[in-house]
Image: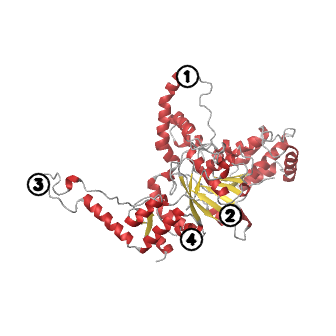
Amino acid sequence: MSQLRARRSRYVLTSRARNTSEAGEGGAGGGTCCWKSSGPGRGYGEAAELRPRTPALQNLPGKGLRKGRVWCPWDSNFSHYRLFQLLGIGRWTNPQYRQFITILEAAHRNQSAENKRQLANYNFDFRSWPVDFHWEEPSSRKGSRGGPSRRGVALLRPEPLHRGTADTLLNRVKKLPCQITSYLVAHTLGRRMLYPGSVYLLQKALMPVLLQGQARLVEECNGRRAKLLACDGNEIDTMFVDRRGTAEPQGQKLVICCEGNAGFYEVGCVSTPLEAGYSVLGWNHPGFAGSTGVPFPQNEANAMDVVVQFAIHRLGFQPQDIIIYAWSIGGFTATWAAMSYPDISAVILDASFDDLVPLALKVMPDSWRGLVTRTVRQHLNLNNAEQLCRYQGPVLLIRRTKDEIITTTVPEDVMSNRGNDLLLKLLQHRYPRVMAEEGLRVVRQWLEASSQLEEASIYSRWEVEEDWCLSVLRSYQAEHGPEFPWSVGEDMSADGRRQLALFLAQKHLHNFEATHCTPLPAPNFQMPWHL
């Protein structure tokens, strides 16, 4: 049976060897790899291991036996030991298994393209996959003070909850019980509610689907799997599909996909840019599938940093050819990358939000408001809008008009969609004079429209002249440069500010009539507007 057919068979190869020496010992003794049923039983990529156990001394003949007890050769410890020996002998006599061990050892010694191609034909425990890219690998970072340290990349820190309060020892002692409670909530219930994809039971249930999706990306799309080592020690599972050799011009652009809180690159939003003809780099959150770690904001940003570095320094894409595409909670890592790598071509945020606190308060009791706010700000601070406002490039927001997740009331109430707040904060930062009272009011009216007909009605009511708006913006850019914020609209009439505000809102936000989890069709995947 061929290697690819073996991948699809009822069993898959798994391994827990972490380096060349372990892989060699496992090949000889049969202790590092095993056959694992692809059906229910264990989580994604987890080996069903049988560890050798030395029989307890009290169970051996003449060694501390209790009166009346007969030693049995089929004692559980002894039987496990014998079974492990038989398992090793069986693997050593299996030519396909020996071939796999040989390829794995060769890949650890020399990570050539041919060795990695052969290794990709097998499905085995990703912990044994050799590291393809290290966070310290880029030559520009060696000895640089601007790169990340082992403590992690830089994040925007939230403002204190009680500003102006003296930071005395007594105040610290008073805050200590609340801080301990927030820490416990964040590291137990909070993290699992925010990132359910990191829960073992969910990954176990999705394992067959994930394996099937991964095989499709490798076999049908010629995807290349890679392991990246982030600065915090987490290993990030990635998949790259290269379209640069095709006739489609968009294949020269790379779309880095940031999944949702229960999304995996195997079955996630990578399908949309793939169908549109782009080169695609997907990755899994820390703690998701083959990635290690826990998905806290710091770990998420560390993972995103090594993914972008991998795209630039190993895959060979220039920042100007990279597009960040995020769905839902993936907007946090997408906006962090946009803030940290300002030369990135564009950012597309689908079904995302401005801040986590309003959404967290929606699902928790009102009596927990203080605890929820404190926990989010200190441990789970997903401040998408604040990060996005530090990016100078083109941005497109996609709002789901029937979104049931990022609305704070009911899905039908489009004004409670937090994507609206993300748009308003972005426009108010970039065009503060335009988004004054008149501009802000008319954009809110436009956002209240629940259909394309209502949007067009509001747009035509104010007689928006797009050519005039473009000429005003281009003239300002030519005179003052592209750096935001702009003071355009400062000497403009109220009617002119309304027209300009509606024009900018329509260019930065597109509606998609669907629920939160509906896949985005390829025709709706459009590049953001820019002058």
Kindly identify which residue carries mark 2: 278
* Residue that carries the numbered disc 3 in the rendered image: 68
Identified at 57% across, 44% down, the residue is 150
Name the secondary structure under disc 3.
loop
Q: What is the crowding at mark 1: few (fewer than 14 residues within 10 Å), some, or many (at least 20)?
A: few
Which amino acid type is shown beneath numbered disc 2?
Tyr
Closer to the chain start, of discs 2 and 3, is 3
Q: CA distance from mark 1 to mark 2?
A: 55 Å
**Residue 138 screen position, x and y as percent:** 64, 53
Of the numbered discs 3 and 4, the one sitting upstream in the chain is 3
Q: Earlier in the sequence, mark 2 or mark 4?
A: 4
The numbered mark at residue 219 is 4
Q: Residues within 10 Å of mark 3 (few under 14, many from 20)?
A: few
Vertical placement of 223 versus 258: above or below?
A: below
Q: Is residue 327 left or right of residue 68?
A: right
Q: CA distance from mark 3 to mark 1?
A: 70 Å
